Image (tube, rainbow, N blue to C red):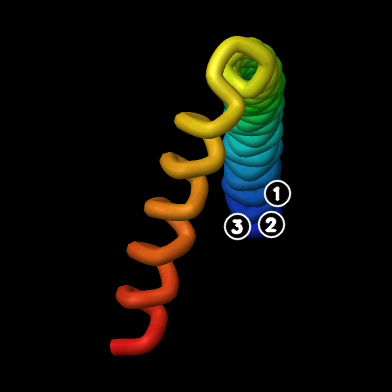
Amino acid sequence: MSRSERSARAAGTAARAARDDIGAGIAAFRGARASVEDALEDAGARGRDALQGAREVRDTFADALLDSLEARPYATLAVVAGIGFLAGAIWRR
């Protein structure tokens, strides 16, 4: 076998190895991309669930406040005034 044939064979082997490495890199990239997409989808779903929970708490609190206002208006006013006083005292410091 001549020197040029050996060089050609070595170059072919190196090219196949490079092609295999590139293929493995592409497969790893696709796997990482799929993992990132899954993580983003999961985070989005958790965010939507948290937002829905916050809306439910807000609605429940508003309903409770309105019920309290209708049942005991002066007591509700006193509680709100107390909360306002405490918030003002904390804000002042």
Type of the residue with mark 1: Ala
Query: Are circles 1 and 3 on residues that touch, CB within 8 Å?
Result: no
Distance CA(mark 1)–CA(mark 3): 9 Å
The residue under the point 50% across, 46% down is 80
- Please, what secondary structure does the residue beneath circle 3 have? helix
Say which quadrant the N terminus sits in. Answer: top right
78 sits left or right of 92 in the view: right
Sequence-earlier tag: 1 or 3: 3
- Residue, disc 2: 4
Q: In this view, does 22 lie above or below 31?
A: below
Position in image of residue 50 (x %, y %) = 59, 22
Type of the residue with mark 3: Arg
Residue 8, label in figure: 1
- Residue at far bottom of view: 93
- Residue at far front of view: 74
Near mark 3 (Cα within 10 A), the count class, few <14, some 14-19 or many ≥20, is: few
- Please, what secondary structure does the residue beneath circle 1 have? helix
Position in image of residue 28 (x %, y %) = 58, 30
